[in-house]
Image (cartoon, rainbow, N blue to C red):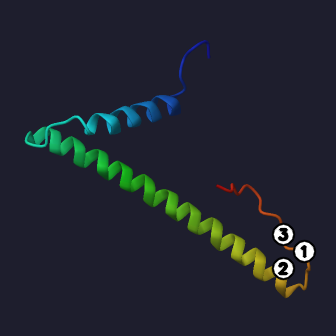
Amino acid sequence: MFGRKSKLEKLKANAQSDYLRCKDLDSADRYNRMFVARIAQRARTNLDKIFVQGAKAEEKRQQDLSKAVREGKKKLPAESGARRI
């Protein structure tokens, strides 16, 4: 409110700045390698979470689809909350 960023926006901005900072670091320094490894692990964890979320959504969609086929519906259930890219 009034120009303040929410906690989520601050976390996103911090993660993005950390990610961009990695490209300018010297790989010879031990602390820089540790920082890059930590950021890489954060990225991997986020990708894993997104994959699991997508897999659960697809599983639910498949269950709804099979239920509609068993009931003999000609019109399949609408996709709720799914975004097309």
Q: Which residue is mark 2?
A: 68
Which dot marks residue 77?
A: 3
Residue 39, percent from left and from top = 30, 45
Indicate the quadrant where residue 68 lies. Answer: bottom right
Residue 19, percent from left and from top = 34, 39
Indicate the quadrant where residue 83 lies. Answer: bottom right
Which dot marks residue 27?
A: none
Type of amino acid at the residue the image marks with label 1: Lys
Question: For the C terminus, which image quadrant?
Answer: bottom right
Q: Residue at x 58, y 63 (%)?
A: 54
Q: Residue at x 90, y 85 (%)?
A: 72
Q: Residues within 10 Å of mark 2 (few under 14, many from 20)?
A: some
Depth-wise, is mark 1 or mark 2 nearer the camera?
1
- Earlier sequence position, callout 1 versus callout 2: 2
Which dot marks residue 75?
A: 1
Distance in Å between CA atoms under marks 1 and 3: 7 Å
Residue 37, percent from left and from top = 23, 49
Q: Residue at x 39, y 31 (%)?
A: 14
Q: Residue at x 33, y 36 (%)?
A: 20
Residue 1 lies, with reference to residue 26, above or below; the image says above
Circle 1: element type: loop
Q: Residue furthest top?
A: 2
Type of amino acid at the residue the image marks with label 2: Ala
Type of amino acid at the residue the image marks with label 3: Pro
Q: Is residue 65 left or right of residue 20?
A: right
Q: Are marks 1 and 2 in contact (CB under 8 Å)?
A: yes
Distance in Å between CA atoms under marks 2 and 3: 7 Å
Question: For the N terminus, which image quadrant?
Answer: top right
Q: Are marks 2 and 3 in contact (CB under 8 Å)?
A: yes
Distance in Å between CA atoms under marks 1 and 2: 8 Å
